[in-house]
Amino acid sequence: MNNKELKKYIIDNGGVTLNASKQTINKNNGYMVSIYGMEYQTKDINDVLKKIDEYIELIKDVNGVYVGVWDDNGIYYVDLSKHIIRRRDAEIYGRNNKQLAIYDLKNNDSVYLNYNDVFYSLYEVIRDKKTKEEIDQRFMNIYDRVRDIPANYRNDNFNYRIYKDELNIHEY
């Protein structure tokens, strides 16, 4: 797709996802998740086209990475994204890449990452315990196991996933 066609496509559709060959992709399942540090925003569509070319050059030899463009109230965003099928994996990847949201392709909508889910779930567990000793013991068990996890793997979602069974946390 040449730049003139691409410009029209972006304006008409509010955005586009491109592969390394600068062709549109039409995935209808899974999630698109931005890669930290590879986000760009501008109000100028011509700057968008330049950034697309720059990003395409970066990913030409990389599988599974795409250039995403979208218009949000007159501001264009350009990023490099990964396509991830499972929501949980997409959320983990998004949090690890300091993203506020991931994009749900099936529902054509953003899914905002709520970093407070873990704490609320822990609160529910604590609230339902009968004694202070039970609560303290539960937290000590978690602390001991978290300490053994290498620091580069520690994040709220990772810990939540590991301990949800131990804490009897039920997902809704």
Image (tube, rainbow, N blue to C red):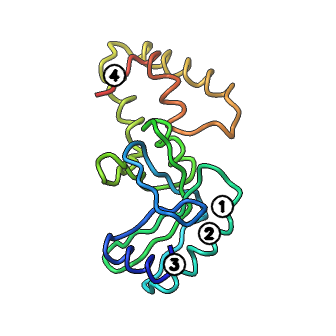
Circle 1 SS class: helix
How far apart marks 4 and 2 lie (CA) works out to 41 Å
Q: Name the residue under label 4.
A: 170
- The disc labelled 3 sits on which kind of residue? Asn
Badge 1 is on which residue?
A: 59
In percent of the image, x 69 and y 38: which residue is there? 151
For mark 3, what is the residue?
2
- 30 or 127: nearer the eye? 30
Q: Distance between the residues labelled 2 and 1?
A: 6 Å
Query: Are there few (<14), some (14-19), or many (20+) residues within 10 Å of tag 1?
Result: some
Using the image, tell me which numbered label, if any, was put on residue 75: none
Residue contact between numbered discs 3 and 2, judged by CB atoms under 8 Å: no
Where in the figure is residue 160, as x and y percent of width and height? 48, 30
Q: Say whether marks 2 and 1 touch (CB < 8 Å).
A: yes
Q: In which quarter of the image is residue 93?
A: top right
Q: Nearer the viewer, residue 91 or 8?
A: 8
Give the camera-side residue of 2 and 17. Answer: 2
Residue 97 relative to residue 147: left or right: left
Which label sits in the foreground, 1 or 3?
3
Q: Mark 2 points at which residue?
A: 55
